[in-house]
Amino acid sequence: MTIHSILLYEDNLLLSESIQSMLRLNKQIKLVGAFENPTDVNNHLQTLKPNLLIMDIDMPDMNGIEAVTHVRKVNREIPILMLTVFDDNEHVFDALCAGASGYLLKKHISSKLFSAIEEVLEGGSPMSPSIARLVLASMHQKSSPENPYQLTAREKEVLTSLSKGNSYKMIAEEIFISIDTVRSHIRKIYEKLHVHSQTEAVSKAINEKLI
């Protein structure tokens, strides 16, 4: 019988303890560690040698998306199953694009934890159809000559809204994201377009027909 060693990263202590209890009941699973944040994840990979990471997306100090990015720099193979409250938000999409293997909704942990673990260990990617479509669209954009700056679908939305003269607050309300997320997107847009202002970004986008 194959024993799978698992590392858990979850900052909600009650939920973490519940997941740990479930994992310990499965004879095919060995829980080798449980942590409130993944700031030391690369050391854990070396010392604890897990076969699978279960990672919350929203955590203090270092979130799950950043952790996935760190892991993928040193280990491209280990499956990473993300935990999330909502399956249609941008964080899920970003985590998958960073290299996560799939995700599990927290409300389904009691009924689907072991099937999700089995799926990612077998090379599958548990995710909703809506997120799968976003991932595929992103892949197509990156390979398209019509998208030389590799702007994501969301960045194009923000840039289009920006070109209408909308404020950060109006952009946030228009596409249902936070103002902080708008700021983050605009920083990335500036970096990708090699510009330093809203006027430059909009001018370049219009002149080069990016939007």
Image (cartoon, rainbow, N blue to C red):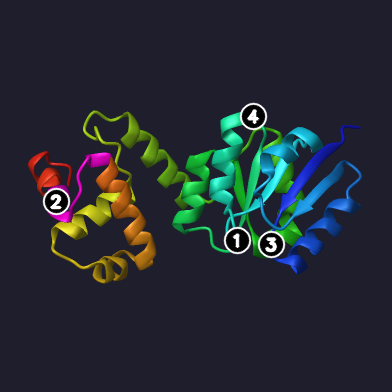
Please tell me which of labels 4 and 3 falls first in the chain: 3
List x then y, in percent, for residue 155. Answer: 30, 50
Please tell me which of labels 1 and 3 falls first in the chain: 3
Residue found 13% across the figure and 48% down from its top: 200
Q: Which amino acid does the dot numbered 2 rest on?
A: Val
In front of the other: label 2 or label 1?
1
Q: Which amino acid does the dot numbered 4 rest on?
A: Glu
Residue with the mark numbered 3: 11
Cα–Cα gap, marks 4 and 1: 25 Å
Residue with the mark numbered 1: 60
- Among the 4 quarters of the image, the one containing residue 177: bottom left
Q: Which amino acid does the dot numbered 3 rest on?
A: Asp
Residue with the mark numbered 2: 202
Please tell me which of labels 4 and 1 falls first in the chain: 1
**Is residue 110 visible in this depiction of the protein?**
yes
Cα–Cα gap, marks 2 and 1: 34 Å
